[in-house]
Amino acid sequence: GTWSVVVRYFSGEKGTCLASSSTIRLVRLDEESSTPDSSEDESHGIERASPNTSSLHQFSISGLGAQALRRGMFFQPDPYVKLRILPGDINKFEPHHGQRKQTSQVEGSVNPSWKKQV
């Protein structure tokens, strides 16, 4: 299967969406037809966690970062990334929906990066 992902940046103060990424396409690596077509947009892989947890997905994020985050008058931001798997508008709720992960916090940075986080 394939999934579409959009990354959004929310204000910690008000919870308003400040920025959105373009759509990222994920392709399941454990299927025979998982080789992405090179003529399409960049694709990333996602694999099943294990046969015992077939309804859950395991993924890692690498090369994630931000630039020029807003500073407060008296503080620097301490950014982190929260990941949550949600169903699409027409999809039914599946066991892997609602999974949450969070990266480590980068203290006092307006240009944070997370090299590899799970």
Image: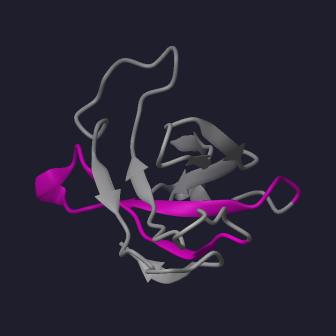
Magenta residues (range): 39-67
- Is residue 29 among the parts visible in the rendering? no
Residue 71 at x, y = what percent? Answer: 63, 66
Name the residue at 52% across, 69% down: 77
Q: Residue furthest right?
A: 39
Quarter-of-image position of residue 84 = top left
Q: Residue furthest front?
A: 74
Residue 36 at x, y = what percent? Answer: 70, 59
Instruction: Say above or below: 75 vs 20.
Output: below
Instruction: Say above or below: 71 vs 107.
Output: above
Instruction: Say above or below: 80 vs 7.
Output: below
Viewer-proximal residue among 3 and 75 = 75
Viewer-proximal residue among 41 and 107 = 107
Instruction: Say above or below: 75 vs 31.
Output: below
Name the residue at 15% across, 53% down: 53
- Is residue 97 among the parts visible in the rendering? yes
Q: Quadrant of the C terminus?
A: bottom left
Residue 12 at x, y = what percent? Answer: 47, 49
Quarter-of-image position of residue 65 = bottom right
Viewer-proximal residue among 58 and 19 = 19
46 in magenta: yes
Residue 34 at x, y = what percent? Answer: 58, 57
Q: Residue furthest bottom?
A: 115
Viewer-proximal residue among 56 and 117 = 117
Q: Residue furthest left?
A: 52
**Left or right placement of residue 56 versus residue 11 in this view:** left
Name the residue at 59% across, 45% down: 5
44 in magenta: yes
Name the residue at 31% across, 36% down: 97
